[in-house]
Amino acid sequence: MVLVILALQNALSEDITLGIMHFHGDLDLSGQAKRLIWNATKVAVFLPVVVFWFLDRREALWKAVVVSNALLTFDLMVSTSLLVANLATDASARVSMLIRDTMLVMLINLLIFSLWYWIADSPRLRRGTGREKEPWDFLFPQRMSCIPSYGDWVAGYLDYFYLAFTASFTFGPADTLPLSRRAKALMILQVGVSVINIVVLAGYALSIL
């Protein structure tokens, strides 16, 4: 999933992915060189995830995934900010690119936060990390009632993807409630990006059309 997010972020327009790269002094790099440096940084952060996964070192793997997803989240926030900043330019001349980037950022937002919810709450990922006894981050309906055939139910990635999907398009939780402060903070960030994309960017692009 991290590789998919990396590929999607690399597909964004150059002017909303390179604004974070600033060099001082006499070093003047081209846009392509800056993109390569930033992508190399993200790949270098992601490599420990692969190594720890092969070595089956669960605690180290969990920490590496958190660091990797944090970097992807930072990239998402910068891309969203630069999208808004680019509205001050002549957007009518590049409306198709604006719509494309908006849709990509919306998809990246969905995937990144589905990963965050999975990382924070998944019982399977908590095994072997010393986090088995931590309280739930999310209250799924299956966890709070005795539904027939769901007595041994355990949340999987698709459940967290569904949670992120509903939060993106309803601007809040649907049938699953955030319990912990970190879950609420993550949902605030995700909904904030969704509001910017759907209300501000998509609305602006459609008004130009």
Image: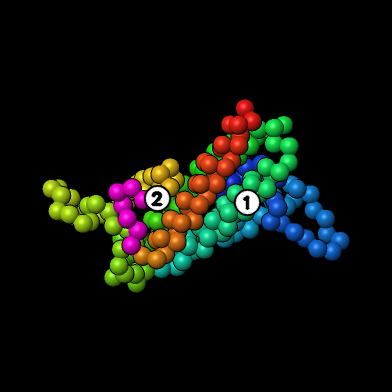
The answer to whether residue 185 is above or below residue 165 is below
Q: Is residue 2 visible?
A: no
For disc 1, the neighbor class at 10 Å (few under 14, some 14 to 19, many from 20) is: some
* Residue identified by numbered label 2: 172
Which residue is depicted at the point 31% across and 52% down? 176
Work out which quarter of the rendered image holds the C terminus and state it: top right
| Residue 65 badge | none
Q: Please name whichever residue, 83 or 53, is drawn nearer the observer in this view of the structure.
A: 83
Secondary structure predominantly adopted by residues drawn in magenta: loop
Q: Which residues are magenta?
A: 172-179
Question: What's under tag 2, amino acid-wise?
Answer: Gly
Q: Please name whichever residue, 61 or 75, is drawn nearer the observer in this view of the structure.
A: 75
* Residue identified by numbered label 1: 81
| Label 2: element kind | loop
Q: Quadrant of residue 151?
A: bottom left
Q: Please name whichever residue, 98 or 196, is drawn nearer the observer in this view of the structure.
A: 196
Confirm whether the magenta stretch covers residue 62: no
Question: What's under tag 1, amino acid-wise?
Answer: Ser
In the image, residue 42 lies at what x, y percent?
60, 56
Q: Is residue 5 left or right of residue 139?
A: right
Which residue is depicted at the point 24% across and 52% down? 141
For disc 2, the neighbor class at 10 Å (few under 14, some 14 to 19, many from 20) is: some
The answer to whether residue 52 is above or below residue 114 is below
| Label 1: element kind | helix
